[in-house]
Image (spheres, helix red, strand yellow):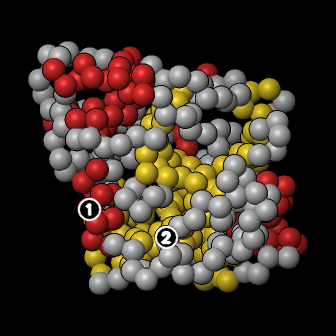
Amino acid sequence: MPSSFDMTRRAALHFLAGAPVLASTVSASAASANAAPVAPSYAVTTPIHIHSLSLRVRDLENMTAFYSAVIGLDVLSVEPDQTILGKDGKPLINLIKRPNDELDDPRTSGLYHTAFLMPTREDLGRWLIMAYMNGVPFTGFSDHRVSEALYLNDPEGNGIEIYADRPHQGWEWRDNRVIMGSYQLDLDNLVEGLPHDGTLPYSAPSGFRIGHIHMRVGDTQLAQDFYVKASGLDLTALIRDDSAAFFSNGRYHHHIGANIWHSRNAGQRPQNMSGLEDAAFSIKPELMDGLRQRLKTHGSDIRETADMLETLDPWGTRIRFVAS
């Protein structure tokens, strides 16, 4: 749920260019290295949560450089036609080389953004400082009550959110719906007291994960049918005009968002288009039988291996459930 980009808010960061370091002169990377390990983010402790996703990319070398040097993922494996990146040895993004693909069209179903979750608010502030000092262009900033978020695009136009959650014990729920919103983010407060480290390549801290994935869909009711009735997630929020719906497991604010802001009535996702190829959930092994039965009852076709179920969402995107 990004807010519109406000140049006056971006101007609030200008103090970074010339102001003295406000706290320690220790670099952010060194500070992270010396910090005590943090507990796993709440988003990835629920029985079902985001595992990874795959993107079709037209320029594999450029996209690999961006996700490693700017987003801070580690390159885990390299093949001629794909690169797998992740953190702590866990794959998060699979970039698939498709140089002849058409550029992704926001009017189609597909990826709205990938939301990378920082383990702490300080990590989010450090990344913001690094990105600003290196001229990374932003598309928005938002305070969502449950989280604080920065928005940008990758070099091929895929949306990205970098965010940090507020403690989940303080989230407000009403009738089993979490209270979220989009408010002005206090950028000055986010970076206050942090060193001005613009070092590239950036390395994300341990615990950096994909917290949620936001999809472009053609119909939010169809999205509810798939993610609630078939996949077993809970509806956690619904924008009043039904233009966006949010789903999660374990009372997380959302693991999946689905909106029709640009893609109302979109049909099957076109083949040979860059952008989202597939998305994967981690799921506790003991939940696989129930998932299998729900998918069959829903009428979904299933491909199954020893530790994975794969199906298609209503718009033809592959959705995988990995027992882990």
Distance between the alpha carbons at the discs numbered 2 and 1: 19 Å
**Quadrant of the snapshot with the N terminus:** top right
Badge number at residue 74:
none
Q: Which residue is mark 2?
A: 103
User: In the depicted view, which residue is nearer to us: 51 or 278?
Assistant: 278
**Sequence-first tag of 2 and 1:** 1
Q: Amino acid at mark 2?
A: Leu
In front of the other: label 2 or label 1?
A: 2
Badge number at residue 65:
1
Residue 223 in sight from this viewpoint: no
Q: Is residue 165 above or below residue 69?
A: above
Q: Is residue 307 above or below residue 119?
A: below
Q: Amino acid at mark 1?
A: Ala
SS of the residue at dot 1? helix
In the image: residue 8, left or right of residue 282:
left
Position in image of residue 114 (x %, y %): 51, 53
* Displayed quadrant of residue 253: top right
Position in image of residue 111 (x %, y %): 57, 60
**Quadrant of the snapshot with the C terminus:** bottom right
Residue 234 in sight from this viewpoint: yes
User: What residue do we see at 67% from left, 30% from top?
Assistant: 180
User: What residue do we see at 56% from left, 34% from top?
Assistant: 3
* Displayed quadrant of residue 246: top right
Position in image of residue 44 (x %, y %): 53, 48
In the image: residue 209, left or right of residue 173:
left
Q: Residues within 10 Å of mark 2 (few under 14, many from 20)?
A: some
* Displayed quadrant of residue 126: top left
